[in-house]
Amino acid sequence: MHGAGWTADMTTRRVLYLLGSAAPPVLNVATVIRQAQAAGWDVCLGLTPTAARWLDDELPALADLTGHPVRSQYKMPKDPDVWPPADVAVVAPATFNTINHWALGLTGNFIVGFAAEAIGKGIALVTMPCVNAAYAQHPQFDRSVETLRALGVRVLYGPGGFVPNEPGQGRSDSYPWHLALAAADREAP
């Protein structure tokens, strides 16, 4: 059985890896997947372990929706890859932790490991942070954003991207997912 994202000729569809961290906008990921599919993407969903725990009850439905297993762990070395190769990866929402780990090359979870390796493989990468203004004041955050930009990652942060809100003032329904999908479309080969 294949999910709604599957078509008879998958070779003609572009592949989007949607890689989400545990920030409130990840709770809306099913809607984002449907939007990406409507735009012609074959979507593979990867989550940090915490994000996967937040969505635990929805994981089977999300796998059915995409037609691919939802990944939140590294595969075993002997296991085949269960996803088609990515044309572009969007790391969003990207938490303070995810952005900093990625920029520093600390690959303790699957999505950060994929994103770090994707830089060297030349896979197009887009990220959109989801941090509050207090986290954004930490000096490492700006260094990490600049590091990722210098490595060729399209970082949607600041004007024209995600703008932090005050702690406790988040509005996950206003997270600008449309900007991440539009950037993926522009970055895809």
Image: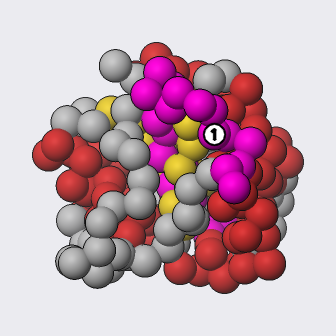
Q: Tell me the SS state at disc 1.
A: loop
**Dot 1 crowding, Cα within 10 Å, few <14, some 14–19, many 20+:** some
Point out residue 87 in the picture as x, y percentages from the top left corner.
37, 32
Q: Is residue 14 magenta?
A: yes
Using the image, determine if residue 3 lies above or below residue 167: above
Using the image, determine if residue 83 lies above or below residue 156: below
Q: Is residue 158 visible?
A: no
Q: Nearer the viewer, residue 69 or 27?
A: 69
Position of 9 with respect to 75 (left or right) is: right
Quarter holding residue 148: top left
Residue at x 56% of width, y 37% of height: 42
Q: Is residue 40 visible?
A: yes
Using the image, determine if residue 100 lies above or below residue 129: below
Point out residue 54 in the picture as x, y percentages from the top left corner.
72, 77
Q: Is residue 140 magenta?
A: no
Which stretch is magenta?
A: 1-23
Q: Quadrant of the C terminus?
A: top left
Q: Quadrant of the N terminus?
A: bottom right
Residue at x 73% of width, y 26% of height: 38
Residue at x 74% of width, y 33% of height: 35
Point out residue 74 in the picture as x, y percentages from the top left corner.
35, 75
Quarter holding residue 150: top left
The residue that disc 1 covers is 6
At label 1, which amino acid type do we have? Trp
Which of the colour schemes (rainbow, by chain, secondary structure, one colour) is used?
A: secondary structure
Point out residue 64 in the picture as x, y percentages from the top left corner.
71, 57
Residue at x 82% of width, y 60% of height: 169
